[in-house]
Image: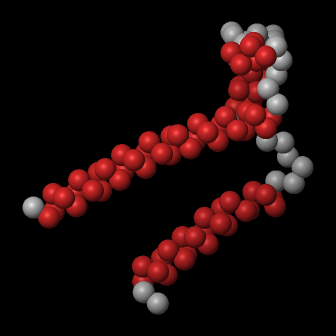
Amino acid sequence: MKKRSLTVIILIIISAFIALVPLFTQKGSEFGGSDDAGSEMISEITGEETDPWFSPVLETMIGGELPGEVESLFFCIQTGIGVGIIAFFMGRFVERKKHENEK
């Protein structure tokens, strides 16, 4: 086996380990957003409740809170767009480098 193949296999195993360990070690813990954690910390420090500065646009339009599945969908779409943009520019840089080396 080549050294490069061994390195790739080791990195895949390490990344799978990093992804799976929290699932088994964090039994019964709650995963919340950073917005909630920040609001709670400010309330603890100041001793008074914080009010949001604005309400989300979509929640205002539909007259209620978005279901969790819809929020996850929007997050996934946003992530996909971001990854697509990054991959596009990385591909452009790689191809530019190839064309420069051919000259």
Question: Quarter-wise, where is residue 47 in the image?
Answer: top right
Question: Quarter-wise, where is residue 99 in the image?
Answer: bottom left
Q: Camera-side residue: 4 or 63?
A: 63
**Residue 91 in sight:** yes
Residue that protrudes farthest toward the right in the picture: 28
Q: Tell me if residue 91 comes above or below residue 81 in the rendering.
A: below
Task: Count the marks.
Answer: 0
Q: Residue at x 51, y 40 (%)?
A: 82
Query: Left or right of 82: which side holds 101?
Result: left
Q: Position of residue 86 (x, y in %)?
A: 43, 45
Image quarter in which the C terminus is found? bottom left
Q: Residue at x 54, y 77 (%)?
A: 9
Residue that protrudes farthest toward the left in the picture: 103
Q: Residue at x 85, y 46 (%)?
A: 29
Query: Left or right of 92: which side holds 97?
Result: left
Q: Position of residue 81 (x, y in %)?
A: 52, 40
**Residue 44 in sight:** no
Q: Position of residue 88 (x, y in %)?
A: 39, 47
Q: Tell me if residue 13 comes above or below residue 92 in the rendering.
A: below
Residue that protrudes farthest toward the front in the picture: 62
Query: Left or right of 81: which side holds 60?
Result: right
Q: Camera-side residue: 14 or 54?
A: 54
Q: Position of residue 7 (x, y in %)?
A: 48, 76
Q: Tell me if residue 100 comes above or below residue 9 in the rendering.
A: above
Q: Residue at x 73, y 62 (%)?
A: 20
